[in-house]
Amino acid sequence: MTRLLEFGLLLSAAGYTLIMLWMVWFTFAFFGFDAGYADLLTAIVLIAMALSPVPVWMYCIRRANALRRGERPRI
């Protein structure tokens, strides 16, 4: 059961990453590459969308490693 939960954690992190990559790609494809940096707020939102998978991966890997060691972390 823990292997399934580990796999689920990593699969959900990968899915979240793919969704965020699609959102950034769609933004550039729809508005163009020069419009992404037209103002500061747009640039901040795009950078936040692009970097948001990093803490998700850190969380999921940390929880999967804890499960592998036999701990029961709160999820």
Image: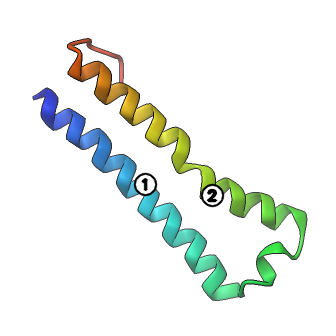
Rendered location of residue 50, percent (x, y): 61, 59
Q: Is residue 67 above or below residue 30?
A: above
Which element type, helix, strand or loop, lies under badge 1? helix
Binning the other alpha carbons within 10 Å of mark 2 as few (below 14), some (14 to 19) or many (20 upward) gives some
Residue type at tag 1: Tyr
State if disc 2 and disc 1 touch (CB < 8 Å): no
Q: Which residue is mark 1?
A: 16
Q: Label for residue 55?
A: none
Decide if residue 10 is on the left or right side of residue 3. right
Residue type at tag 2: Met
Decide if residue 47 is on the left or right side of residue 71. right
Residue drawn at 71 percent across, 86 percent down:
31
Which element type, helix, strand or loop, lies under badge 2? helix
> What is the number of callouts on the image?
2
Q: Is residue 4 above or below residue 14?
A: above
Q: Which residue is mark 2?
A: 49
Decide if residue 39 is on the left or right side of residue 43. right
Quarter holding the N terminus?
Answer: top left
The residues tagged by marks 1 and 2 sit, at their Cα atoms, a distance apart of 11 Å
Decide if residue 68 is on the left or right side of residue 62. left
Residue drawn at 36 percent across, 53 percent down:
14
Q: Residue furthest left?
A: 1
Rendered location of residue 48, percent (x, y): 68, 53
Residue drawn at 42 percent across, 63 percent down:
18
Quarter holding the C terminus?
Answer: top left
When asked about the image quadrant of residue 23, the answer is bottom right
When asked about the image quadrant of residue 3, the answer is top left
**Which comes sooner in the sequence, label 1 or label 2?**
1
Residue drawn at 57 percent across, 79 percent down:
26
Rendered location of residue 13, percent (x, y): 38, 47
Binning the other alpha carbons within 10 Å of mark 1 as few (below 14), some (14 to 19) or many (20 upward) gives some
